Amino acid sequence: MNKENILQQLEEIAERLSIRVTYDSLKEGSINTRGGLCKVSGDYRIIVDKRLTAKEKIDVIAISISKFDISQFYVPPEIRDIIANSSETEDEQKAVHVNSHD
C-alpha cells in the first residue's frame, strides 16, 4: 500500500472516531511542532503541519489515533500495525499535545 493510501485510510479512521483532521502551516514564528491531537471546544482534532512529507503526516495521525480504541472498526492489518507501532519521544509528547481553552 502506498503512503497516500495509508494516509487516506488513517484519515477515514479518524473520521469514524469523530476526530477532525486538518492541515495547517504550523512552523511559523515560535511554533515548532509537526502537529498532533488536541481538543477544541470539547471535540478532538488532529492538526497536521501541511508541509510534512506523507510519511511524517502518517506518523502524526497514527500516533494520535493510537490513543483511542479502534477495536470496533475493521482496520486493514497493515494500517492496524502502523497505528500499533506508532510511538513518540517524551519531547514529542510535550510538543504535540496542546489543549485549547474549553
Image (cartoon, rainbow, N blue to C red):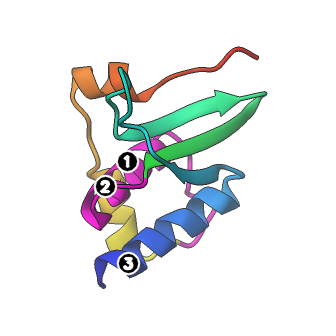
- Residue 48, given in percent of the width and then of the height, sits at 45, 48
* Residue that mark 3 sits on: 4
Q: Is residue 63 left or right of residue 91?
A: right
Element under disc 2? loop
* Residue that mark 2 sits on: 52
Q: CA distance from mark 2 to mark 3?
A: 13 Å
Q: Label 2 near label 1: C-beta < 8 Å? A: yes
**Crowding near the residue tagged with mark 2, few <14, some 14–19, many ≥20 C-alpha atoms within 10 Å:** some
The numbered mark at residue 79 is: none
Vertical order, 29 against 6 (above or below)? above
Q: Is residue 85 left or right of residue 4?
A: left
Range drawn in magenta: 50-74
Residue extending farthest bottom: 1
Vertical order, 90 against 88 (above or below)? above
Is residue 57 in sight in this rendering? yes
Residue 59 located within the stretch drawn in magenta: yes
Element under disc 1? helix
* Residue occupying image coordinates x 42% and y 55%: 50
Point out the tag, 3 or 1, that comes first from the N-terminus: 3
Vertical order, 46 against 29 (above or below)? below
**Crowding near the residue tagged with mark 3, few <14, some 14–19, many ≥20 C-alpha atoms within 10 Å:** few
Quarter location, residue 68: top right
- Residue 43, given in percent of the width and then of the height, sits at 74, 36
- Residue 24, given in percent of the width and then of the height, sits at 51, 48
Residue 4 located within the stretch drawn in magenta: no
* Residue that mark 1 sits on: 60
- Image quadrant holding the N terminus, namely bottom left
- Residue 80, given in percent of the width and then of the height, sits at 39, 64
